[in-house]
Amino acid sequence: MDKPISSRSDLPTHGAAVLPSVTVDSYNIEIRDGDGFIGDKASKSAFWEIVEKWRKPLKDAGEDPFGNKSTDKLKKDDLVAELEEGDPEAAGLVQSAVEEFSQQFAKIIRRFLQTQEWRDTEAIVVGGGFSGSRIGELVAGRTGLLLKAENIAVDIEMIHNDPDDAGLIGAAHLLPAWMLKGHDTMLAVDIGGTNIRAGTVQLNLKKSSDLMKSKVAGSEIWCHADAETNRTEAVAHLVKMLEGQIRWNEKEKFALAPVIGIGCPGIIREDGSIDRGGQNLPGNWEARGFHLPSAIKAAIPEIGGSETMVVMHNDAVVQGLSELPRMQDRQRWAVLTIGTGLGNARFTNRDVKKDS
């Protein structure tokens, strides 16, 4: 078993396999090759290592378009500028990096598609921080072409919402519709290896009952990687962020649902503990006695006079769920999130709506 997850669908359960609209066939699959985990070859750091490799010949010739600026200080926008406005060699550098990374990404996708859990996948959504850029779009487009050239019938699509927003919006799909009915907003948390984000998701159920029109109405981000912090301090900071969102909802007179949805790295047990995969978080989040949902509920026992319910799932699962309204014509689809690592999840829709 890749994940100790529950199959209950009646009430929200941490790390559940059966959600209101989809079955989570798998998530956080760890596929190895001779060099280790293949996902390490499709991370943000892997891409910048490729950029550094292609800069070297130009550095040696004294023609590096980025001058003395180190690669770890470059931004994706710097690459886009050279691609669109730089001289042919500079544009070629960026094209070469995109091509090499796309080749690696296509190889990784082929390996995922060979697993039993990913069999018959019809579409793959590409998310994560890397996807929120023109470079990410080019990688997704080139990867899709490489797979089509091999007659691999899978669509590669970019995540529609901003990746940061998607990590919050998807939390609404962890809950049955009746829990959100009559409410304007809900609280959501996206925990990453670098940042923690807490925000308010405006549900807009009157405009679209399938949450197609939901959006992030407000949020706060904290870069825990830049702070010398421990687990206790991180949880306290998160609680403070959530309390700020509650006050904001009260000020705006939104009907806030008494629920908090959380996306968190790693394998999420039914009791809310993390089995593995939380190594980039501040402190030991994988201790069996640590339950983030319980800690948050203890600090925020009520919202709007009703008992608080906290539900947590893997962060790639939650981000992928933000695409659910757009995947109604597919039965089996997946998400790959390119960030600190490569997050992954595969879904099967429980009710497929084919075009007539």
Image (spheres, rainbow, N blue to C red):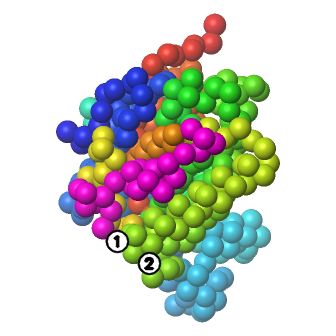
Residue 204, position as x, y percentages in the image: 73, 33
Q: Can residue 181 be seen in this view?
A: yes
Q: Which residue lies furthest to the top in this view?
A: 356
Q: Residue 43 carries which label?
A: none
The quarter of the image holding the C terminus is top right
Look at the numbered disc 2 and give the secondary structure of its residue.
loop
- Specify whether 148 is left or right of 6: right
Q: For the N terminus, which image quadrant?
A: top left
Task: Pick whichever, 147 or 329, lies toward us.
Answer: 329
Asked if disc 2 and disc 1 are in contact, CB closer than 8 Å, the reply is yes
The residue sitting at the front extreme is 305
Seen at 60% across and 52% down, the residue is 163
Pick the front one: 250 or 11? 250
Query: Measured along the vertical axis of the image, is residue 348 above or below residue 288?
Result: above
Q: Give the range drawn in magenta.
A: 283-306
* Residue beneath the point at 68% across and 33% down: 183
Q: Where is residue 351 in the image (x, y as percent from the top left)?
A: 50, 16
Q: Is residue 300 left or right of residue 35?
A: right
Q: Which amino acid type is shown beneath numbered disc 2?
A: Thr
Residue 91 on the magenta segment: no
Furthest toward the right, the residue is 252
Is residue 303 part of the magenta span, yes or no?
A: yes
Residue 287, percent across and down?
A: 25, 61
User: Which picture quadrant has residue 212?
Assistant: top right
The crowd level at tag 1 (other Cα within 10 Å; few <14, some 14-19, many 20+) is some
Where residue 87 sits, quadrant-wise, is bottom right
Q: Find the distance from the CA under tag 2 to the CA under tag 1.
A: 8 Å
Q: Mark 2 points at which residue?
A: 229
Sort mark 2 into few (<14), some (14-19) or many (20+) by Cα contacts within 10 Å: some
The residue to which callout 1 is attached is: 283
